[in-house]
Image (spheres, coloured by chain):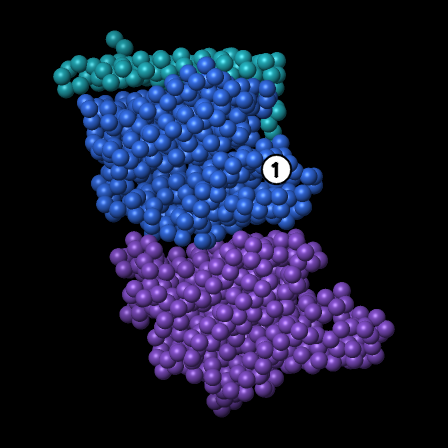
Amino acid sequence: MTNLLIALAPEAFLVITALVVLGIGVSAPKARGAITAATLLGGLVAAAALLLHPVDGNFLHGMVVLNPLARLFKLVLLGLGLVSVVFAAESFPKLHFAEALALLLFSMVGMMLLAGTEDLLMIFLALELTSLPLYILAAFAKESRASAEAGLKYFLIGSVAAAFLLYGLSLIYGVAGSTNLRVIAKLSGDPDPLLIAGIALTLLGFAFKIAVVPFQLWAPDVYEGAPTAAAALIASGSKVAGVFILTKILTLGLGHWTGTAGWGQFAPGWAPVLALMAAASVVLGNVAALVQSNVKRLLAYSAIAHGGYLLIGLCAADAPSLTAVLFYVIIYALTTAGAFGVVVIVEKQRGGSHLEDFEGLGKSSPVLALCLLVFLISLAGIPPLAGFFGKFYLFTSALANGRHLWLVILAVAMNAVSLYYYLIVLKHALVLPAPKETVPTAAPASKFLVVLLALAVLALGLAPNALIGPLSNGQTVKNIIINTLQK
Amino acid sequence: MTQVSPLLFLILVPLVASAFIFVGSSARRTALIASLVNLVFVLALFAVFQTGDASYQFVSSTPVIPSLGIALTLGADGLSLIMLLLTALVTVAAVAVARTPDKNAGWFYASLLFISAGGLGAFASIDLFFFYMFHELALIPTFLLIGIWGSGDRQAAAWKATIYLALGSFVLLLGLIGLYLIQPEGSRTFDLRSVISMAGLGVLGDGTWVYLLLLLGFGILVSLFPFHTWAPQAYASAPPPAAMLHAGVLKKFGLYGLIRIASPILPEAVTQFANLLLILLVGNLLYVGYVTISQRKLDWMLGYSSVMHMGYIFLGFAALNVFSITGASLLLFAHGLSIAALFALSGELRERTGTLDLAEFGGLAKPMPFFGLLFGFASFAAIGLPGFVGFPGELLVFFGAFAGGEPLMDSVNGVEIFALNNFQIATVCAVWGVVISAIYMLRAYRRIFFGPVSDRWKGLPEISGVPRVAIVTLLVVMLVTGFFPNLLIRLLASTSLWL
Amino acid sequence: MPTLAHYLYVSGALFSIGLLGVLLRRNILIIFMGLELMLNAANLSLVAFSRFHPGLDGLPGYNAQVLVFFIITVAAAEVAVGLAIIVALFRAKQTVHVEDLDTLKF
């Protein structure tokens, strides 16, 4: 029992912090500095609890499962959440600031619980705990029509996806007779038609969470309309949590029904479905991004494309590919969070996030422009940045599996296309002169964080083993894969 | 091995210098000092290089991702050393002739240094992953240089070059991954030496598609016909130092890669697709050569000529024997220096006259006799006249290529006679290529420097100062190695004999 | 005597009706009701499964029944959040019809 308390201590600290922040918000709603500081402090305490007193184990029949991999992801999610907290100070409306941060904290709790569970019930609850605060945060800028509209769209599509997911999970439960993934994994043989329907509905539900076709429609509107700090968390943390738990469900619970998506060697299972979703997302995301004039929308389409790349690795479904997927999603989240950070600062200075608003950035703020260069080049997959290594690792391991040549070729061709729109943003930021005088606004904390993220992206590109080591050493990834998939 | 390779120092110097520039040290001076340091350093490496030793020297290896067999392995043999010298020389010349731009001078010189670091790193890498990565490192600065400080329709040129180069390098990446995957599972590595020894043992899988990917990827990067259209436009728009570094150094990466990777590892595939490559390279030599003759502007002409000259080097690679590969390696060096000198001179010319339209020039040798002399020498070097290093290079390529392939026999009225095989036909076309390049180079030389001088050009200042020293140095190196090609061939002999 | 299949047919029908409502109706409040229908379809199938798949001890699988209670709670929370967002949107745009949501466009 005490171990369970220790295991859940980080989440508990975050909940307490959220309550404290709400309290400060009621008594001193104007003290926004204090509110941010309290949130960050709570986050650091949670991180300390996670790092200093690690417990591994399986609690409450798989409701709470902790192992090195889960702890690593909890730490990453916590970090991404705190990054959004810092950006929130620049991009959220001044009114009800404490409530916004409390909601951010609740969403972080949901994500962290999601990273540490192997039970369908807990997965559904944690997903909802992640999503509900994000719906509100997306609609938080009340005076902005775009924000309210983004919130509603996010909410509607998200709820439909949640209903799909829940129905899918209920069917999987019906066939397996248990909500525990490891018990579900004991099913084998030819899949029951109900199970096939369940898997299909579950995949559709997750398509929303990681913004891939066919549930990608919300992403551009929400990224554009939501307050940028909320969009940053939706793009980074929420995606990491979604990919991690989807990997777990597929490879731990449903690992017997992988199937193949190879050209001419099709076998039914979830991999062919994922392959179709991946191909459609990679093409749609990259092509639609070409014509965007708003950087946040552009990042949304690029997020759809990156969701597609991730699914390619999931299709391959063996230990090296899954390591690559998990590595890639972390790198992607860090990079996107950084890019949103630059958008936050530019938005504050210029009042918009259109391409024209980035003009002259290279002159007015060279450091920021250099960071933007690092983030976008990393997203485009150019060395020596982490994004290049992530793609390289992902495609190499997907190819080594020997069945996904067509997907990888499609992805590589589309990736060459993607360089074009990233460079368009850079052209506006670095090449074109500023049309009007800008008033540089001091945003030291956000700027510092952006530089830090850029350095992290650079460092992980130069020394990727710093992250791949913990992911691939020993039993970490194998913890979430059933035996037959381990190579 | 725990010792640190001196080559690492070579790569770090430009990067550290760019860091210094960003924190505020004088951009031009820092860049010049860094490039000179590197040149001296490469010459020192030449001095301590053991010519008899065929293996890599100055080797150091730092594991980066052991699970994938990736390590930062640096080392140099004769061929890489020559390419390093080329890079160091061209970098010095490029920085020396660069005009400091009014805005963002720091970014400008830092981009030049990054291209240099990328080139040095690529030529010093034994690990294929880093070989690729260092080349990519140079791609973005090239784009920035063209897009920000270029002239003419620089945006379009920058986009075109970037898209082509990005596509080429992604195809190349697939090829390199393919090369990794045809190795037997469990011993997969990116270490070139291990892959070559695996190829020697015959344990690699079918490499045909890998070769095609490599040929397409490298081919786009080297502007192999018909993937060449990005190059002339990019070089015409690029600021002269960028054109020098890209045409002189970075573009050589593709051919260097083919010689380094494809010829020792996938010789069967090279032979199998030799006819395809021969058709394409004849396209480079004759079709692009014809296009070059019809150019009316000096910068476009030089851009096309640099595309055309790649044909000889491809021919040397395709024939795949000791002579032709040695010749191709010499040509890599020779063409790098001559095209750098020509781009430097055309940049100086544009600086003085504001135009590069051949029709507007005439009699420029009167106000600028020394400039004319330099341009003449550089043109001769580009054509490959005797006395310049291009001459032994072309000669070896022609001899090697003529001996390439199976001898073809034909019988006429019962009498056995030799017939020309495809390699020999391509060699004949290549010799015609020399004539074509003589036509356009000498015609441009005559148009610009001879004939009556118009009043417009009477007061043009002579070339002087640092640019003069830099260009003279390039020409002197070409002359010295042209009269004593053995200086280089001695280094190369051991490298090429690996086949 | 109704079997498991009967319950699943009903739940599938509920889910489909809900989904059609979401896709076809233009009034956000009606869409909302469709959503609730979809969630309750899942509840029905969960309860049916738990009733018809007793565990080794012969008792129904209580996990699913607990899950149903959680879902009912979550659905209530979702309604609260959703209605709040609808109110915010109504203040900003004076509409509850999805075709009026055109501020953000491709």
Specify whether A146 is left or right of B454. Answer: left
Q: Tell which of B136 and A391 is nearer to you.
A: B136
Total count of labels: 1
- Give the colour of chain B: purple
The colour one sees for chain C in the rendered image is cyan
Residue beneath disc 1: A440
User: Which residue is more in the foreground, A39 or B139?
Assistant: A39
Q: Quadrant of residue B123?
A: bottom left
| Residue situated in front as seen by the camera: A48 or B63 | A48
Q: Residues within 10 Å of mark 1 (few under 14, many from 20)?
A: few
| Residue B221 seen in this snapshot | no
**Quadrant for the N terminus of chain B in the image:** bottom left
Q: Residue at x 52, y 75 (%)?
A: B333
Q: Relative to B103, is A80 above or below?
A: above
- Image height of C17 relative to A68, above or below: above
**Which residue sits at x=37%, y=27%?**
A42
A243 to the left or right of B95:
left
Chain letter for blue?
Answer: A
Q: Amino acid at mark 1?
A: Pro
Residue at left 42%, top 45%? A456
Q: Is residue B212 above or below residue A163?
A: below
Inspect this view and state whether residue A344 appears: yes
The answer to which quarter of the image holds residue B149 is bottom right
- The chain letter under disc 1 is A
Residue situated furthest bottom in the rendering:
B415
Horizontal and vertical percent position of residue B289:
64, 72
Q: In the image, residue B238 lies at what x, y percent?
A: 64, 61
Position of A249 with respect to B156 (left or right) is left
